[in-house]
Image: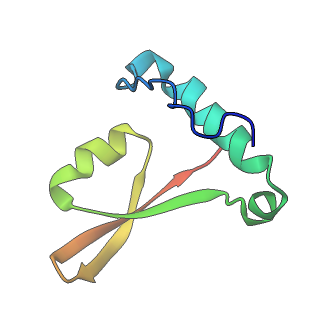
Amino acid sequence: MSGFGKKPAAVSIRPARTDEQKMLESLQRRASLSNPGDRDAAASFLHVIGNPHAAGFYVSCGFRVTGTVETQFGIGLAMRKVLD
């Protein structure tokens, strides 16, 4: 195996910038759609159960509240976002 026993190259990870959001979402979607099994499982909506205290965050990310759900932590907000 080529490279066996060699020290891996250093990896640097940084937080994404806000202006990179669309590009990163597009990259992730293209990567998942490149796998035949993932293509078949592609969805039109992203569903989440969110903490009511974070509702503003979810709404700012494009989610809309569709109802409430009882969880082990209390009432959660059922939300969904249309995937492009």
Residue 57 in percent (x, y) is at 27, 42
* Colour scheme shown: rainbow
Position of 29 relative to 17 (above/below): below
In the current view of this chain or complex, which residue is farthest to the right? 36
Q: Residue at x 74, y 36 (%)?
A: 2
Answer left or right for 83 relative to 42.
Answer: left
Q: Residue at x 35, y 71 (%)?
A: 67
Answer left or right for 43 relative to 54.
Answer: right
Please name whichever residue, 28 or 12, is drawn nearer the observer in this view of the structure: 12
**Toward which corner of the image does residue 78 lie, by quadrant?**
bottom left
The quadrant of the picture occupied by the C terminus is: top right
Please name whichever residue, 20 or 2, is drawn nearer the observer in this view of the structure: 2
Please name whichever residue, 9 or 33, is drawn nearer the observer in this view of the structure: 9
Residue 68 in percent (x, y) is at 30, 74
Position of 63 relative to 9 (above/below): below
Position of 16 relative to 62 (above/below): above
Q: Residue at x 51, y 25 (%)?
A: 9
Q: Residue at x 39, y 26 (%)?
A: 13
Answer left or right for 6 relative to 51.
Answer: right
Residue 3 in percent (x, y) is at 67, 34
The quadrant of the picture occupied by the N terminus is: top right
Residue 53 in percent (x, y) is at 15, 54
Answer left or right for 79 relative to 77.
Answer: right
